Image (tube, rainbow, N blue to C red):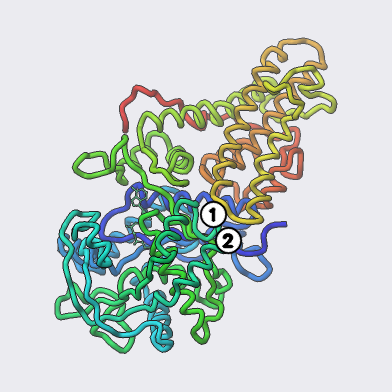
């Protein structure tokens, strides 16, 4: 049975002071792969078409009318740095935000993101709901007016505690520029009241902050003797137009909401409608490790506070906050001065030469998901591309397609009962084990469906993608051992049956492998499915149209979705051309 709780995943909302780069594209791709795996596991439809209308046949499949999977991304627009950067481009903050939000949308379309919604914090739906939340928190005394004196990092728009400022030598840890001492009337959130409850929640729910190193980091800052102070949540509004960008504190227009509080609420405002409210609580917030504190401490505390306000009893805590590591480039931190920045042009160049699917594959399989930073290196890209894609799924599918075209006029031959490698005394596995190919094929799909039904885990996605690669390697090994090109030359009719069996086994294994590859490379796999006439998608011409059945049924060996004998198999061009390792980077 597919899981009954909807799966709701978010990315951070991105600042619109500048254009998207690898960091933004990475988080969105990983979230997209996870969302696509969940749609596949549950056999549900894809995202709405642009403009908010669903593609035909992709209606929510649950009886309660909720989409089974909901994937949210968007832009964070009320930051002071948006005002500064707008001014340097001679534009109003709104016009500059509009421009860059569009850049993000285009980047995410190019990278193949299948988000269900794209939220912008300057949208009325967001601003209205945030104003309501803040008013409720003020009425409950959880947000109150006071005075703030502290060390401010203008670049980060962040106050540092006295200790943190001292430790940093009163300089920004990020920009190196001096911190500024400031006193101002200010609204505060009573974060201090939540220290014990947060500790209890984090200690009692090991899955709440992941990976574990991140969890320990937060626990270290929450456990006594650490003290959690109330936090400022407003900024003053003056005559200076630069201070007028942001959501006003309800009833006190001389103050605007601090951009981080405004931004965190996006996860809730996007689903705070009659149709979507049951999507809350969110399953997983995927973020970078640099913004962990906001998501793992401030955000749950805000939610606990809101939940105590009348009318907000439904506001529970998210299941998981997952903080991934960072990309570096060719072994060094990315910087404009080193010229090693992986910006959008660079990503487009890679997609142009190797295909968007290959770029997604590299990001999804080689990225800094579990902890350590990952290096974007051209040599590594080519190595992975050739090994997993060109010499892997690409070569294997074209080899098998070729043989079916050559020996069976391009139609899938029938599997003959009693014909299998073990029966012929061929040792398929180096360990001499007696597994059959179908066991191998079913394993990855089963593991994924079963474990993610219990608890979502990014590691399962990685295992499933690897499972696809292993399955392809197994097919190659099977071909090397059974030597169908030699069997084809043998005149006996039993050899013809054996050849048919080998090739139909290969097709079935590669079909299952392709399902496991799909979340990372939806367009490429949809292309393969068109050539082979696999009916996995509601609309074969639309990789986003949703699946006709849950993964457990689709991936069943010889099941309802395996190909019938006689099905036309077109070989087509290789899905991935081999890359020349000595060719310079694009
Ligand atoms: N607007 C805030 C998030 C608000 S969420 C309520 C923000 N925006 S951001 O545009 O600066 O960064 C968004 C994400 O990009 C962060 O998760 C950050 O970790 C990620 N990355 C930025 N550079 C990165 C790399 N070099 N590598 C991987 N991810 C990085 O923070």
Crowd rating for badge 1 (residues with CA inside 10 Å; few <14, some 14–19, many 20+):
many
Q: Is mark 1 within 8 Å of ligand 1?
A: no
- Residue 401 falls left or right of residue 102: right
Numbered mark located on residue 63 in the image? none
Residue at label 1? Answer: 35
Q: Residue at x 52, y 29 (%)?
A: 573
Residue at label 2? Answer: 7
Q: CA distance from mark 2 to mark 1?
A: 8 Å
Q: Residue at x 45, y 31 (%)?
A: 385
- In the rendered view of the protein, which quadrant contains the C terminus? top left
Q: Would you place residue 79 above or below residue 337 in this image?
A: below
How far across and down, in percent of the image, does residue 574 sit?
52, 29
Crowd rating for badge 2 (residues with CA inside 10 Å; few <14, some 14–19, many 20+):
many
Q: Residue at x 64, y 27 (%)?
A: 474
How far across and down, in percent of the image, does residue 8 sit?
54, 62
How far across and down, in percent of the image, does residue 430 sit?
67, 21
Judging depth in this view, the residue of 453 and 296 nearest the camera is 296
User: Can residue 269 be seen here?
Assistant: no
- Counting the numbered discs, the total is 2
Q: Would you place residue 309 above or below residue 275 in this image?
A: below
Q: Would you place residue 239 above or below residue 351 in this image?
A: below
How far across and down, in percent of the image, does residue 238 sit?
17, 80
* Element assignment for label 1: helix
Judging depth in this view, the residue of 148 and 419 nearest the camera is 148
Residue at the outermost right position: 418
Judging depth in this view, the residue of 5 and 102 nearest the camera is 5
Residue at the outermost front position: 225
**In contact (CB < 8 Å): disc 2 and disc 1:** yes
Snapshot quadrant of residue 444: top right
Judging depth in this view, the residue of 62 and 527 nearest the camera is 62
Q: Residue at x 46, y 70 (%)?
A: 300
* Element assignment for label 2: strand
């Amino acid at each position: 049975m597919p899981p009954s709780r909807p799966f709701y995943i978010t990315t951070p909302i991105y600042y619109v002071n500048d254009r998207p780069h690898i960091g933004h594209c990475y988080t969105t791709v990983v979230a997209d792969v996870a969302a696509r795996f969940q749609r596949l596991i549950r056999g549900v439809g894809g995202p709405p078409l642009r403009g908010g209308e669903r593609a035909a046949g992709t209606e929510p499949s649950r009886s309660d009318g909720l989409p089974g999977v909901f994937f949210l991304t968007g832009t964070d627009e009320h930051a002071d740095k948006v005002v500064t950067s707008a001014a340097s481009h001679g534009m109003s903050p709104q016009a500059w935000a509009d421009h860059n939000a569009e850049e993000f949308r285009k980047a995410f379309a190019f990278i193949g993101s299948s988000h269900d919604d794209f939220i912008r914090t300057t949208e009325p739906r967001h601003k209205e709901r945030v104003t309501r939340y803040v008013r409720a928190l003020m009425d409950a005394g959880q947000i109150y007016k006071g005075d703030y004196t502290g060390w401010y990092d203008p670049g980060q728009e962040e106050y540092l505690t006295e200790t943190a400022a001292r430790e940093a030598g009163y300089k920004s840890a990020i920009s190196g520029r001096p911190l500024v001492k400031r006193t101002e009337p200010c609204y505060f959130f009573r974060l201090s009241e939540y220290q014990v409850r947060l500790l209890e929640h984090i200690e009692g729910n090991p899955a709440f902050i992941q990976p574990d190193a991140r969890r320990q980091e937060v626990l270290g800052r929450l456990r006594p003797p650490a003290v959690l102070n109330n936090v400022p949540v407003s900024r003053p509004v003056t005559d200076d137009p630069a201070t007028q960008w942001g959501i006003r504190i309800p009833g006190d227009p001389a103050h605007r909401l601090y951009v981080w509080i405004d931004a965190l609420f996006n996860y809730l405002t996007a689903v705070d409608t009659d149709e979507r409210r049951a999507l809350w609580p969110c399953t997983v917030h995927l973020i970078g490790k640099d913004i962990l504190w906001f998501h793992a401490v401030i955000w749950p505390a805000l939610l606990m506070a809101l939940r105590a306000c009348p009318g907000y009893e439904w506001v529970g805590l998210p299941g998981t906050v997952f903080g991934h590591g960072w990309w570096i480039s060719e072994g060094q931190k990315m910087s404009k001065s080193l010229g090693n920045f992986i910006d959008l042009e660079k990503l487009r160049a890679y997609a142009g030469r190797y295909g968007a699917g290959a770029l997604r594959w590299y990001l999804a399989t080689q990225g800094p998901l579990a902890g350590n930073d990952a290096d974007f290196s051209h040599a590594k890209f080519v190595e992975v591309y050739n090994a997993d894609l060109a010499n892997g799924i690409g070569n294997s599918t074209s080899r098998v397609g070729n043989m079916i075209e050559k020996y069976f006029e391009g139609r899938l031959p029938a599997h003959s009962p009693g014909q299998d490698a073990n029966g012929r005394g061929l040792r398929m596995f180096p360990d001499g084990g007696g597994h059959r190919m179908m066991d191998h094929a079913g394993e990855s799909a089963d593991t994924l469906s079963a474990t993610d039904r219990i608890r979502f885990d990014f590691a399962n996605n990685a295992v499933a993608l690897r499972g696809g690669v292993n399955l392809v390697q197994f097919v190659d090994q099977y071909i090397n051992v059974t030597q169908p090109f030699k069997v084809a030359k043998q005149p006996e009719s039993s050899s013809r049956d054996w050849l048919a069996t080998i090739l139909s086994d290969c097709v079935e294994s590669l079909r299952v492998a392709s399902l496991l590859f799909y979340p990372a490379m939806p367009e490429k796999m949809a292309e393969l499915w068109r050539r082979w006439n696999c009916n996995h998608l509601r609309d074969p011409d639309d990789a986003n149209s949703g699946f006709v059945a849950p993964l457990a049924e689709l991936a069943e060996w010889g099941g309802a979705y395996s190909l019938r004998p006689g099905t036309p198999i077109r070989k087509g061009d290789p899905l991935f051309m081999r890359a020349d390792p000595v060719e310079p980077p694009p």
